[in-house]
Amino acid sequence: MNNITVIGAGTMGSGIAHLFAQYGHHVSLVDISEAKLGEARTSIARNMGRQMSKGLLTEDEKTNALQRINTFTTLEAGVPGAELIVEAATEQEEIKLRIFRELDRLASPGCILATNTSSIPITGIAAATQRPEKVIGMHFMNPVPVMKLVEIINGYATDQTVTRTIVELSKKLGKTPCVVNDYPGFISNRILLPMINEAIYSLFEGVAGVDEIDVVMKLGMAHPMGPLQLADFIGLDVCLSILKVLQEGFGNPKYAPCPLLVNMVKAGKLGVKSGEGFYRYQEGARAGIPLKFR
């Protein structure tokens, strides 16, 4: 596969475009916002610069990779010729279904359609197309160029040759693929989000503060990042969306989002991307100052 189209120029989409271009693929990055596409190119160049400073990329490799990325504001312009399309748009089911109907119409018959969704059922997305056997989940972790895991999710109708193709492609991108089946939250978020939600409940109930909860999990459980800091990094709106998918998919109250999380999202406190969540962040900083909630 040489020609890859990535839909969505946000954090995940730009990271996926970066990765494919770094490994020699020609990338069409599509977003309806010209400004978003400009921000994505700037972010990719900055992140490749960091790789250079660590000796992971040369100047020529960076230049060549950036030249392999072209940007488009319409699917009609960015989809033709693609052998694989990776959708990384907003984590809202209706938006994804609409995009996949269009991708199915515009893409060549042999093109594989992948989604980077973190929780929305692959089978439902595939059912919006006339090629459900060629639809698969390709769930990258953030930051995409750094994190080794790709969670590959088979929908009900996904053809095993498609699965094998995506597994081998993931390996060629320097990733470790793990194949799972299509149930709410898959594996990563079915396990991770209840833990994050329980940490938020512990804060909500006054059991401990932000810093204390994260320190216990980092030092006591050998987690590289505490659950509240990780929630900020993921985005509290994304965490809430995934918990709602789990709650609806399993019909179990144990997945009910903590009221504190719901209120924070309503207030626009979304974590790193908004500058404040469980921590307050200076512009461009990843480390934050833990906030008090009592």
Image: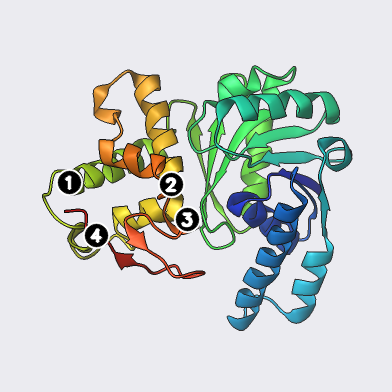
Residue drawn at the location 41% of the way across and 54% of the way down: 271
Query: For the residue carrying disc 1, how many other residues have a C-alpha within 10 Å: few (<14), some (14-19), or many (20+)?
Result: some
43 or 139: nearer the eye? 43
Label located before the other in sequence (2 or 4): 4
| Residue 166 appears in the picture as rendered | yes
Amino acid carrying label 3: it is: Ser
Residue 125 vs 77, above or below: the answer is above
Amino acid carrying label 4: it is: Asp
Q: Residue under circle 1?
A: 202
- Quadrant of res 128: top right
Q: Mark 1 or mark 3: which is in front?
A: 3
- Spatial separation of the CA atoms under disc 4 and disc 1: 11 Å
Q: Which mark is residue 274?
A: 3
- Disc 2, SS: loop
Q: Which mark is residue 276?
A: none
Q: Mark 3 or mark 4: which is in front?
A: 3
Residue drawn at the location 79% of the way across and 33% of the way down: 111
Amino acid carrying label 2: it is: Gly
Q: Do callouts 3 and 2 mark residues in contact (Cβ within 8 Å)? A: yes
Label located before the other in sequence (3 or 4): 4
Q: Mark 2 or mark 1: which is in front?
A: 2
- 206 with respect to 27 (left or right): left
